[in-house]
Image (cartoon, rainbow, N blue to C red):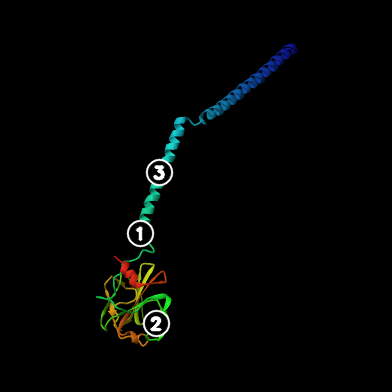
Amino acid sequence: MNQKERRAARGLQIVAVCCCFCLLAVGAGVTYRAMDREKAGGSETLQKEQPVTAVQSKTIEIAQAEQQREAEKTKEIKETKETKAQPARKNEQPVFAAPLEGEMKVVLGYSTDHAIYDPTLEQYRTNASVSLSAKQGTEVKAAADGVVKEVKKDAQAGNLVRIAHGEDWLTTYGQLADAVAVKEGESVKQGQRIGTVAAPTKYGVALGEHLIFAMEQNGEPQNPMEKMKTAE
């Protein structure tokens, strides 16, 4: 091959290379545009899917309403169980019965707002209990259902028993004989025997044989005679 033919061949090679580069450039451009359109199309699809239709909104509202009803139902069931588990309402007065059978004679009355005369002490004083005339050996009974809170010997009231009736109410029975029939922590029923009347201590000897009976609500003295009268 002579020099002229070689130059012609090189020219063809250069033209072929340039054509290849052009084809590659065109292909890359087409590919980029296709990818760009695909991306743009995807965004448009997402944008089209974002709006919530009226049907979808209604479905969401129904689901939320159902969840709210379920929550309220669960709360109601829980409150009902808690109410059933709770003890009797606070400040509800028990139905009190007399601690002694038969007619009760008051030998020293209840008086917390003014002083009354105490024949044993020979002086005027307030009194947060009542003294009920009763012979030695007379049975003393619980005025209402409850739990024995305390059994002890007191210098003035002799042997005494305190019974708690729920969280608020407390009854006290004094001037009892040594053979007390109940013990601390024991549950008792209304009318259950808790002891018998003993001889009075020196602090109540002028009253004769008697039972000391006291009643409290939330630590505040109450007139036992009035509470027993209002009991149905």
Residue at x 71% of width, y 16% of height: 10
Residue 145 appears in the picture as rendered: no
CA gap, disc 1 and disc 3: 24 Å
Could you classify mark 3 by the number of other residues whose Cα lies within 10 Å: few (under 14), some (14-19), or many (20 or more)? Answer: few
Camera-nearest label, 2 or 3: 2
CA gap, disc 2 and disc 3: 67 Å
Which residue is disc 2 drawn over? 117
Q: Can you say which quadrant of the picture contains the N terminus?
A: top right
Could you classify mark 2 by the number of other residues whose Cα lies within 10 Å: few (under 14), some (14-19), or many (20 or more)? Answer: some
Which residue is disc 1 drawn over? 85
* Extreme residue in the bottom direction: 202
- Give the numbered dot on residue 62: none
Q: Amino acid at mark 2?
A: Tyr
x and y percentages locating residue 105 in the rendered image: 29, 78
Which SS class for mark 3? helix
Camera-nearest label, 2 or 1: 2
Give the camera-side residue of 25 and 229: 229
User: Of marks 2 and 3, which one's residue comes earlier in the chain?
Assistant: 3
Left or right of 132: which side holds 38?
right
Q: Amino acid at mark 3?
A: Arg
Residue 122 appears in the picture as rendered: yes
Which SS class for mark 2? strand
Which residue is disc 3 drawn over? 69
Give the camera-side residue of 178 and 174: 174
